[in-house]
C-alpha cells in the first residue's frame, strides 16, 4: 500500500527551497552541517566553574589572620561564659591551598572552553575538593561552591556537550 504525497508536498516553494534543492549535497554544504555548534550547556558549565574558581581566589585573598574582627575582651567573656570551645581562635582555612585550587579551576575552565574534554573530570574532582575545603573551614562559601559544583557538573552531562567535546 503506497500512497502518493499530496500535490505541492515536497516541491520547492520559494527561493530558499529552490537554492537548497539545486545545491543538493555539495561538499560545502556538508562541511557546514558537520561542524558542531557550541552547546549552551557547555557555556553554562564553564560559567559555573569560573564562579567557583573566582570564589576560591577571592576567599583566599580575603582570608584574614584574625578570628573575625572581635576584640580579645569579647572573646574572653564568651569563652568564660560558654567554655573554650565556644569561640574558635584559630584560622582553620588554608589561604594558599584555596588560591592554588582556585587558579587550577580557572585554568581547567579555560581548557574546557576551548574544547579539552578531559578537563571536565579534573574540574569535578577540584569542585569536590573546594567544597570540602570551605566546609572544613566552616565558611559560608561552601553553599555557593556546592551549587557551582552541581551546576557545572550536571550541565556537562548533556549529550550535545559530549558530542561537541568528543569531536
Image (tube, helix red, strand yellow):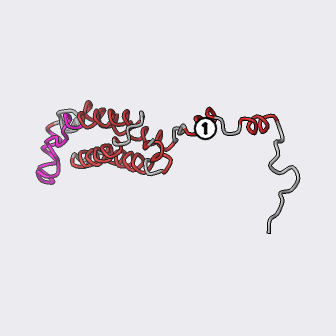
Which residue does the image show at 13% across and 49% down from the upper left? 79
Residue 35 placement, left or right of 83: right
Residue 16 placement, left or right of 65: right
Q: Position of residue 43 (x, y in %)?
A: 47, 39
> In the rendered image, which quarter contains the N terminus?
bottom right
- From this view, report whether residue 167 is shown above or below residue 62: below
Q: Main secondary structure of the magenta part?
A: helix
> In the rendered image, which quarter contains the C terminus?
top left
Is the residue marked by circle 1 packed among few (<14), some (14-19), or many (20+) residues within 10 Å?
Answer: few
Please identify the residue farthest to the top as the structure is shown: 61
Of residues 105 and 84, the one nearer the viewer is: 105
Q: Position of residue 76 (x, y in %)?
A: 12, 44
Judge whether residue 86 is colored magenta. Answer: yes
Please tell me in which quadrant of the rendered image residue 69 appears: top left
Of residues 153 and 16, the one nearer the viewer is: 16
- Residues in magenta, as a range: 73-98
Which residue does the image show at 14% across and 45% down from the upper left? 77
Secondary structure beneath dot 1 equals helix
Judge whether residue 77 is colored magenta. Answer: yes
Residue 57 placement, left or right of 160: left
- The residue that mark 1 highlights is 30
Q: Position of residue 121 (x, y in %)?
A: 32, 46
Of residues 132 and 84, the one nearer the viewer is: 132
Amino acid at each position: 500500500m503506497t500512497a502518493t504525497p499530496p500535490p505541492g508536498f515536497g516541491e520547492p516553494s520559494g527561493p530558499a527551497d529552490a537554492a537548497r534543492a539545486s545545491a543538493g549535497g555539495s561538499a560545502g554544504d556538508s562541511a557546514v552541517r558537520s561542524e558542531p555548534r557550541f552547546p549552551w550547556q557547555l557555556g553554562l558549565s564553564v560559567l559555573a566553574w569560573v564562579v567557583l574558581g573566582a570564589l576560591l581566589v577571592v576567599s583566599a585573598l580575603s582570608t584574614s589572620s584574625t578570628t573575625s574582627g572581635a576584640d580579645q575582651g569579647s572573646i574572653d567573656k564568651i569563652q568564660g561564659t560558654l567554655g573554650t570551645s565556644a569561640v574558635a581562635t584559630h584560622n582553620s582555612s588554608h589561604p594558599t591551598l584555596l588560591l592554588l585550587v582556585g587558579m587550577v579551576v580557572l585554568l581547567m575552565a579555560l581548557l574546557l572552553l576551548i574544547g579539552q574534554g578531559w578537563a571536565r573530570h579534573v574540574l569535578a574532582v577540584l569542585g569536590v575538593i573546594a567544597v570540602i575545603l570551605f566546609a572544613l573551614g566552616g565558611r559560608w562559601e561552601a553553599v555557593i561552591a556546592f551549587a557551582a559544583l552541581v551546576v557545572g557538573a550536571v550541565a556537562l552531562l548533556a549529550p550535545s556537550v559530549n558530542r561537541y567535546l568528543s569531536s
